[in-house]
Amino acid sequence: MRIEEHLTLDVDAVDFSVDLSNVVRNRALPGDRPADLRRFLGLIRAVVRYTRDDSAQVYAVADGSLLSLPALTAQERSTLHRWRSEGLIQVRNVADDRLLELADLAGLPVISDDKFLDTYRTYPWIAGSRDRFFRAVAGPDEGGVRLEPRTMPIPPDWQISRKEEESRLLAVGMYDRRHGTGARRQLLTRQWRCPEDDCPIFGAGATASQPPPMFRNGTVRCPTHQRQLADIGPKPAQKQLKLRVDGVVKARFMLVAGTATVLGRAPTGPGVALAREWLDETAHGRISRDHVELTWDGARVTVRDLSRNGTWIRHDRASGPGRPLPSGRRLPTDRTAWTLRAGEVVVLCDGVELVASGRTYVFDTERPTAPVPRDALAAEAAEATVFERPAGP
Ligand SMILES: [Zn+2]
């Protein structure tokens, strides 16, 4: 396994964000030294197994001290420096803030065993979260590391009134009275330039796709240099989907904003052909040459069924190895478009599915230009601050 193939700062392609230092220094994981880069290699293997995707990718954030940590070997330190200069990992003074910012902006699930308690005020969705945080634990698997979902604790003062919480959110700049969170999400649709020319991520020579910028006190800043970034225009918009067959990811492909993409056994026009070796006899027989059409408009994915045998939509929540799939809703046969919502999966036939890559809440993104009425804003603020009650009798 070449570990570099699993590192990216492209949020459209990534499956998890990872607190690199937290994993490397985790003494509960295999390794005799206080810090050991092999723990991170073990974690990457764990991510590949967990996602059942050989091409799974992580967005790794390290705190700056890791790169000069004496507990690492000279070779490990130079590997980290190389990764940073190649734009494969991000280095910050404090990794936590960046991980939560990515989770908030792009919905990336976070791998860390940090409690994040001091950040609940800024990110109220953390309290009680059951699907956005994971930790690396010692496991019997190859590499000795396993990925485990976490349920985030709910702070004792979870009953604070909505009104009170809303004003706190307004005070820290989480809600813009005119645009709500929409204004912040819009940052993801732009390309940025750092005044530091040699900036590995936002510099003039940086060609890799850009990670989201940092947003502090109303300005957009470089996460590496803390300097204000210049908006250099809209980001070429694309959305990544995965093809999953019997729970295993077989391929990824991109939807380009405004262009319809047809998927099937052998699309008659431009589109994505499902390779014969991915499908068993039954699936191959049930999938049409032009099976389904997907369109991304920059904010939402719509699906139209073009097939002979049908296309279904189901919620991904109840899926998992060994668990039966819930039955879904069949798409209309008159080719009416269906707008995918958060967590929905497109089922081409039993076991053959399309899922959004990485970002759990990818379909939640509001249209960036739509004005939000005040009532809706207040409702949104209220909704975002409802803490889940602890499970109890
Ligand atoms: Zn910079």
Image (cartoon, grey):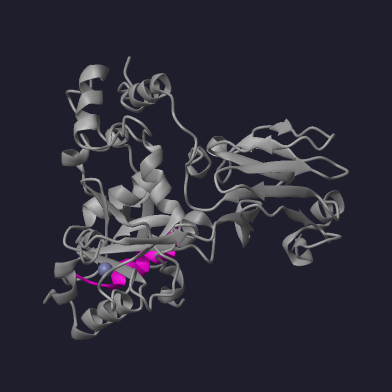
* Figure check: 198 above or below 95: below
- Residue at 37% from the left image edge and 72% from the top image edge: 88
Q: Which residues are magenta?
A: 35-47
Could one spot residue 132 in this view of the protein?
no
- Image quarter where ligand 1 lies: bottom left
Magenta stretch, main secondary structure class:
helix
- The single residue placed furthest to the top in the displayed view is 393
Which residue is more in the foreground, 279 or 241? 241
Q: Nearer the viewer, residue 1 or 145?
A: 1
Q: Position of residue 337 (x, y in %)?
A: 73, 37
Please tell me which residue lies in front, 211 or 15: 211
Q: Is residue 113 left or right of residue 140?
A: left
Residue at left 39%, top 65%?
9
Q: Residue furthest left?
A: 70
Q: Residue 91's image quarter?
A: bottom left
Percent of width and height locating residue 82: 30, 81
On the question of residue 33 being in view, the answer is: yes
On the image, the x and y values in percent for residue 294 come to 70, 48
- The total of numbered circles placed on residues is 0
Indicate yes or no whether the magenta region holds residue 318: no
Q: Is residue 286 above or below residue 31?
A: above
Counting from the top left corner in percent of width and height, residue 36 is at 23, 72
Is 36 part of what is drawn in magenta?
yes
- Above or below for 130 versus 164: below
Residue beneath the point at 37% across and 23% down: 383
User: Quarter of the image holding residue 393?
Assistant: top left
